[in-house]
Each structure stands twice: as structure tokens, then as C-alpha cells.
Image: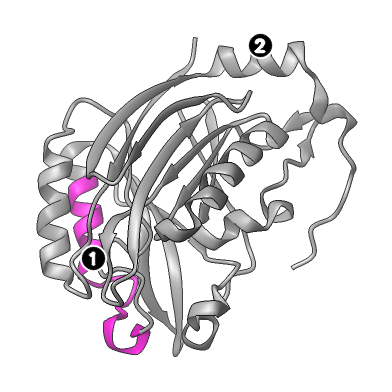
Amino acid sequence: MSELTISLVQSALSWEDKAANLRHFEAQLLSLKGKTQVVVLPELFSTGFSMQAEKLAETIDGPTVQWMRTMAQQLQLIITGSVIIKENGDHFNRLLWVLPNGELGQYDKRHLFAYAGEDRHYQRGSKRLIASVNGFRINLQICYDLRFPVWARQQSKDGQPEYDVLVYVANWPERRRVAWMSLLQARAIENQCYVIGVNRVGEDGHQIYHSGDSMVIDPLGEILFTQKDTPCTHTVTINKEHLQAIRRQLPFLRDADAFDLLT
């Protein structure tokens, strides 16, 4: 029986203050040593959802990524969350999947939030990242991607769904929390997968309030965990056999439309 233990860290963020945020999250991570296999941090966890990309960006060898590598190695777990990265003169809202051996996977946010001007400061990505750990395949996405179901849609690979878990890291404001919660459930139901959404809490530098509402949802759309308003660290163990049993009992994915995803 294959299981995977994942910890969600729902936290307030110090606005554009990398040092303070890294100190804070280091304490959270140290408390999880030996208790989990994967830790999920919010979108742009070291800065908050800032449009000051030119000021705050660092390279892939910069201090935040080095911190992630050090913590992953020290605690022998996987860490994921997004960071402002500069590469070849462009800036990216880049999710990193950091392994204990220092290797990393990366996903650049595909759908940029033009309402806040994100498209004027960041370059969008063109490739999805599906990571593998302990027999689970994990599709990693960022915040606004949640509103675009085609980008997350399961595609058959050798007759099997291509992933088992869909993860969203976010800075999603409280004023649109109904959309956040509803769409997370919808993604779980339509893709027959576990969905994990990790959001921040508190006000950002523009006095926009975030209620968190981080969630764990099973492949039937049942909410296994959610927390509103307060910081928290929640650890959940998901079960591959439970997922496979649902897919066998309700084989909806085999009736899905075939399509090619053009980028």
C-alpha cells in the first residue's frame, strides 16, 4: 500500500522581507523533521505577491534557493513553493520542487494575473511540471492557474491518468475565497485526483487580506482539511489504493475527450 505524507504551511508573510520570511519558515520546517515527506509553502513565500520583480529577483543559485536546498538536505524531505527568479534578463514566478539531494524541478507560472499587473513584470511559463515521489505523480501549479482547467486536465498516458495529486501554491485574497474553494473541489472531481491548495493568511503590502482556506480534497471532492484565517501547519497522509479504488469504481476518465495541449 503506497502512502505519501504531505505538510501544508499556511502562514502570514512579511512584505518583501526575505530574511524575515526565511527565518519564520525555517522554524516551521524544523518542527516537521521526521514527521513528513513533502512540505508545501505558499506562492512567493519569501517576498509576498510583489510586482517588484526587478528589485526582489534572484538567480537560481541565489540565497532563497540555497536555503531550500539546505533545509531539504538537513531535514531529508522535499520542499516546494514559488520564488521570484531572474534568468536571461527575464523574471519568473517559479515554483521549485527541491529534493534532499539538492536536485530540483521547476515550473514557471503559466497564467499571469493581469488584473494586478503580473503580466507586465513576469514572463509566463510554457511547460507543466509533474514530479514523482513514493509512487505518486504530482502536478504542480500556481495560484491563478486554478481558474484555467485545461492546463490541469488529466491526459491519458499509456491508458493511465498522468498524475495523482494536483498542488496549488497561492496568494489568493479573501474577497475571492468562494472561487478558490469551489475551483479546488472542481479540479479534484473532474481529474479524479487529490488536490492540495496552500494559501497565505493576513494582509499584504497593499492591505489586501488573505483568509488562507488551505485545503486537502480527496478524488471524490470531499474536503479532508481546511483552515480559515489563522496560520497553521497541517500534515496529511494520502493513500494510493484509495485513489485507485475510486478510479476503478467510477471510471469517468476513460470517457474524457482526447486533446492536445498547445503552448
Q: Is residue 39 above or below residue 174?
A: above
With 112 as the anchor, is 207 left or right in this view?
Answer: left
Crowd around label 1: few <14 · some 14–19 · many ≥20 (10 Å): many
Q: Which residues are magenta?
A: 52-72
Where is residue 231 drawn, in percent x and y?
A: 22, 45
State which quadrant residue 164 falls in: top right
Q: Nearer the viewer, residue 171 or 36?
A: 171
Disc assigned to residue 245? 2
| Amino acid type indicated by mark 2 | Ala
Q: Nearer the viewer, residue 219 or 100?
A: 219
**Membership of 228 in magenta stretch:** no
Q: Which residue is mark 1?
A: 64
Q: Earlier in the sequence, mark 1 or mark 2?
A: 1
Where is residue 109 drawn, in percent x and y?
A: 53, 66
The structure residue drawn at horizontal position 59% and vertical position 43%, both measured from the top left corner, is 182
Residue 66 visible in image: yes
The structure residue drawn at horizontal position 45% and vertical position 60%, both measured from the top left corner, is 175
Q: Is residue 50 above or below residue 230?
A: below
